[in-house]
Each structure stands twice: as structure tokens, then as C-alpha cells.
Amino acid sequence: MKKFFLVLAALAFAFNADAQDGFKRTSKGTIYRIVTANPGEKIKLDQIITFNMVQKTEKDSVLASTYAVGRPFQARCAADGDLMDLFPLLAVKDSVIIKVPTDSIFNGKEETRPAFFPKGSNLMVFLKIEKVQSLDEAMAERNKALEEERAVTAKLATQEAGIASTYIADNKLLLKTTPSGLKYTVTQATIKRKPLPGDTVYVHYLGRTLDGKVFDTSIEAEAIKSGTKQDGRAYEPISFALGRGEVIPGWDEGLQLLNEGSKATFIIPSKLAYGERGAGNDIPPYATLRFDVELVKVSPVKHTLAKKTVAKKVAAKTTTVKKAAAPAAKKAVAKKP
């Protein structure tokens, strides 16, 4: 009985402490304080909520923010979902602070508790409700955004070929074109061996967009010249197994055309590079890229000779040697350079 009263006293103390700083508790125990309350209908079950969120320590250090990412969260107001005891108390443009005791977060896993969340501390979560929609309204808005996105990407895809053609003409490049669309020219030829799929190759390179911006290079002098030098980076040829999808498809194909020690210029369309997504801040979607490369070294692996099929040509009484059909190449996932 004494223990029961002690528990009641502890709960009463917790509620009073919350009340003293303006915080309240929902029936499920969520500790909250509404900062901004606006007129309007409260959020209802099954509505789609769009909201921004900032997570902080009690010392105001920001841990995560949808504002920084530039994309708010969306959630359906479901009876058994997180914070669904709180959302029905809010309306559009309301803002609220939620206090989450870190002792509950790290209960049973103290070894994962970071130093900035000592025992007895709280995670502070700031929410602002940006939009409340029915499921049909949210789907219609999403479909419209997808249509607009498809229209933009289609326009970029159409423009890509024209931009590449203009660049090639303006720079007076004499290029060969492979069936895949890769364009290349050998600027320094050798008679050494060509690499085969599986061989390890060592390559120096300078990568540029067609507007002349250098986005990456393995050559320190070029990095300094273009203002892209990275402290602590070792500027040396990169190495990888050729034909294994470790680099963009344009590289896997193009380097097999070169002899060890040779140099070349590749003009690589986006479908053989970074496609409709681009890469980082420097390579936009549907960007044709220029790479000036040097195949510094080839380290061959042991290759098994393909079997040859010999067919007799009866009329001429001679034989014709046919190469065994090569297996279809697996589409590479662009990972580097």
C-alpha cells in the first residue's frame, strides 16, 4: 500500500512539474505545449498531415530539421500511429513543442546513449502543421507534382542531344560513336594490350560538364587549377575491376576501347552516366559529360578462352570459325568516379 502511494506521489509530482512550465500530457502520456493555436477544424482520423519538424536538445542544439532538408514530413492520422493522441488537438498552422524523456528512449540500451542526452534529459521536438488534406486531395496533389516532374525531365532529355551536338561542333571534336551512344577520340595512342572485363585498370581522369565546370579529377594540378582540390585526398590514378559495374557504364565501355598507356576524350551521354537523377550539386539530371582519361596501367587477371564453334562449309569445302555468343551485359550501377 505504501508503494502504491509513493507511485501516486511520483506521478503527481511529474504532472505538477509539467504544468509549471506550461506543458500538458495527453491521455497516452505525450508531453506537449501548444505554442501557436489557430482557428479552424482540428485534424481528423485518416486525414493526411504535412508538417515540419525540428529536433533539439534541451540546450537548443539542432539534431535534425526538415527545414534544412527542404522537405516536410507527411503522415496519415491513424488511431494507432505515433503522436496520434496529439494531432487531433491541432489545426492547420498550429505549432507545438513535444518533450520526450530520453530515459524512455534509451531504456534497456544505455550503451547507445550519446553524451548530449544525459540521464533525466529530454529530446525537444518542434512541430508545425503546414497542411491537412483528405487522402483523395493528397493523391491528386501528388499526381499533379509527378506530371510536372515528368514534363520537366522530358524537356531536359530532349535538350540533351542538342546541347551535346553544339558542344562537339564548337570544340571541333572529331569523335567515333559506339552503338550505345558513347562518343570518343583517342588523343594519344599506344600498341600495348587492351584491358578485358575483370582486369584491374588504373586511370587518371578529368571530369567536366559541358559548360566547362570541373566536378572531379584525379590530377592534383587540375584540381588546384579548377579550385576543387580536397585537403587530405591522395591525387593518384583510381583503380577498379573493369566491366563489373563499379563505375558508370560509359567508363566500363570506353576503357575497353583503349590500350594501356593511351589517352582519350569521352563524351558520355546521361544514359551511360548519371541519368535522370544527376549526381550531387555539380551534375544535373540528363547531363552529358566530358572525361579526359589516361589508361595508366592494366593488371590482367587470368581469362578463360571462349569456346569456338567450327562449322564446315560444304560447297567450298572450307571451315568458318564463329565466336560463341557473348552473354548480355548487365547494366552497371553508376558508383564512381
Image: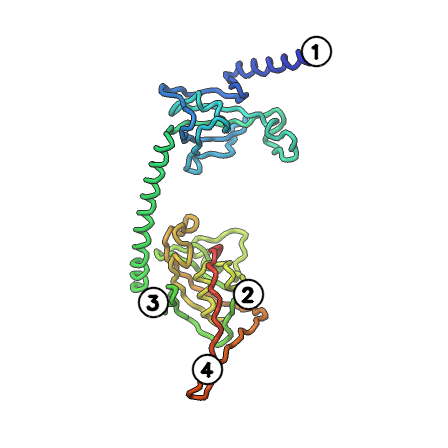
Residue contact between numbered discs 4 and 3, judged by CB atoms under 8 Å = no
Between discs 1 and 3, the one toward the N terminus: 1
**Quarter residue 58 falls in:** top right
Between discs 2 and 1, the one toward the N terminus: 1
- Image x and y of residue 82, in percent: 50, 28
- Image x and y of residue 235, in percent: 52, 58
Q: Nearer the viewer, residue 212 or 49?
A: 49
Label 2: state its secondary structure: strand
Identify the residue under disc 4: 320
Identify the residue under disc 2: 200
Say above or below: 275 vs 177: above
Badge 1 amino acid: Lys
Q: Residues within 10 Å of mark 1 (few under 14, many from 20)?
A: few
Residue contact between numbered discs 4 and 2, judged by CB atoms under 8 Å = no
Separation of marks 2 and 1 at Cα, in angstroms = 75 Å
Label 4: state its secondary structure: strand
Separation of marks 4 and 3 at Cα, in angstroms = 39 Å
Identify the residue under disc 1: 2
